[in-house]
Amino acid sequence: MRPLFVSAAPLRVQFFTPPPPRVICYLAGQNRTPDRAVFPLLFAKNTGGAARDTAAILPLVVQAGNAQRNHPHLITHKGASVTAQTHILIPAWVDDMLTPVEKIETHVRGLRHKAVSVFILHGGEILLQQRALGKYHTPGLWANTCCTHPHWGEDPHACAQRRLSEELGLSGLNPDYRHRLEYRADVGGGLIEHEVVDVFVVHLQERPDITANPDEVMATRWTGPDTLRAEIARTPELFTPWLKIYLAEHVGDIFGSDLSEGTSG
């Protein structure tokens, strides 16, 4: 644990797990300081729970803001350069008009936006991924094979192929479009996912060789739908909101007869 952000007045610093650089850059670039309302989970104190003077941390917030304005894709923290991936524009609806909006801003504002999800199936099992701890929301939670946002102007199918390659090292796949669904969910830290999702399915005859990108994925595993539903019922906090919604409300639309009776729900 290390101090990173200033809490509300009086000026004191709380010890907590810092958010990913993308969120730091976005907030600093907006001249905003994260507070308990924006990032409630990040303000959980460690065992020491001590507060410190902010003299050491204020320059970091200022520095982050300067880095964001001068070099949108880079933030420097104590001499270490970290790729921030800010200013990624995704398609979102603003006043009922589809508009390119910065990705973090989209989630802070809770804007309705386009998304892409992929399920890879093999032998009645689903490939799941555990999101990397550096993800800007729902870090460490289990999700479907791939869930992402298309870039502005990007075709959903091309997006699915791109992210399968970038996240899991899987190229040459041809995802089959299945369904478009919409959901809205609180994903923690004051961020909202309100997605219009194009869902794709990939059938494989053999399990592929996966090369997970550690910046995106910390683990993968195969599991049957019955086992997955039982795990979600037992420990729902370990799974992303959208995966739980997919399995609770959209199984038939996504999988159809792909999964045998008794496992497809």
Image: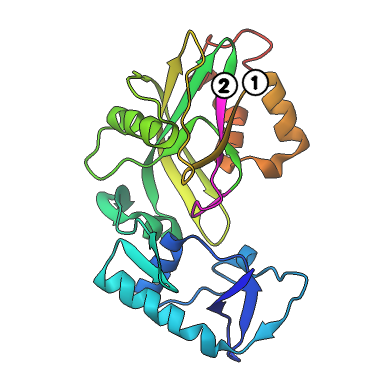
Q: Residue at x 54, y 46 (%)?
A: 132
Q: Residue at x 43, y 36 (%)?
A: 167
Residue 17 picture quarter: bottom right
Q: CA distance from mark 1 to mark 2?
A: 7 Å
Amino acid beneath label 2: Ile
Q: Nearer the viewer, mark 1 or mark 2?
A: 2
Mark 1 nearby-residue class (10 Å; few <14, some 14–19, many ≥20): many
Give the colour scheme shown. rainbow
The answer to which of 90 and 84 lies nearer the viewer is 84
Mark 2 nearby-residue class (10 Å; few <14, some 14–19, many ≥20): many
Amino acid beneath label 1: Pro
Q: Residue at x 67, y 26 (%)?
A: 228
Q: Which mark is residue 126?
A: 2
Q: Secondary structure at mark 1?
A: helix
Residue 218 picture quarter: top right
Circles 1 and 2: CB atoms closer than 8 Å:
yes
Q: Which is nearer the N-term, disc 1 or disc 2?
A: 2
Residue highlighted by disc 1: 225
Q: Is residue 95 visible?
A: no
Image location (x, y in percent) of residue 36: 60, 73
Specify whether residue 201 is painted magenta.
no
Span colored in magenta: 127-139
Above or below 17: residue 260: above
Q: Secondary structure at mark 2?
A: strand
The answer to which of 257 and 22 lies nearer the viewer is 22
The answer to which of 148 and 53 lies nearer the viewer is 53
The answer to which of 244 and 56 lies nearer the viewer is 56
Q: Quadrant of the C terminus?
A: top right
Above or below 96: residue 190: below
